[in-house]
């Protein structure tokens, strides 16, 4: 799969239909994803397999993923919009 086709596929998977998720995931995909290393790109793809309700809880900081890989990518996305 070419990089362009993959990015388009990820774009559609990143569109969740929940504004709170869309405003975090879509800009991250457009502005950051291509600069991530292969492992973090895989973490992002794995995140997209999660349920919207779980992601909402994580991104609203009402809980954290138990999986350390998912916790890492959630933190990366949050840090982008909430720098220390």
Image (cartoon, rainbow, N blue to C red):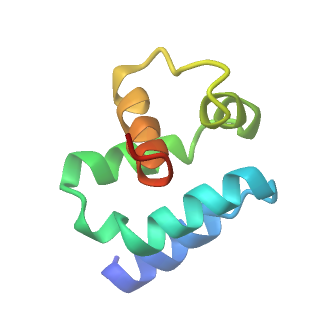
Residue depicted at 34% across the width and 76% down the height: 1
Q: Is residue 57 above or below residue 20?
A: above
Q: Position of residue 60 (x, y in %)?
A: 67, 34
Position of 26 compared to 57: left or right? left
* Outermost residue, front side: 84
Q: Quadrant of residue 3?
A: bottom left
Position of 72 compared to 25: left or right? left
Residue depicted at 35% across the width and 21% down the height: 68
Position of 22 compared to 69: left or right? right
Q: Position of residue 45 (x, y in %)?
A: 44, 51
Residue depicted at 74% across the width and 51% down the height: 20
Q: Is residue 64 above or below residue 20?
A: above
* Outermost residue, left side: 37
Residue depicted at 57% across the width and 42% down the height: 49
Q: Position of residue 77 (x, y in %)?
A: 45, 48
Q: Quadrant of residue 18?
A: bottom right
Badge count: 0
Q: Quadrant of residue 59?
A: top right
Q: Position of residue 43 (x, y in %)?
A: 36, 43
Location of the C terminus (image quadrant): top left
């Amino acid at each position: 799969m070419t990089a362009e086709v993959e990015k388009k596929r990820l774009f559609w998977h990143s569109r969740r239909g929940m504004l709170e998720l869309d405003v975090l995931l879509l800009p991250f995909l457009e502005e950051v994803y291509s600069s991530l290393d292969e492992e973090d790109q895989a973490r992002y793809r794995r995140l997209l397999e999660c349920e919207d309700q779980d992601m909402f809880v994580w991104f609203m900081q009402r809980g954290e993923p138990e999986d350390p890989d998912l916790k890492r990518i959630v933190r990366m996305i949050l840090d982008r919009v909430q720098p220390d």
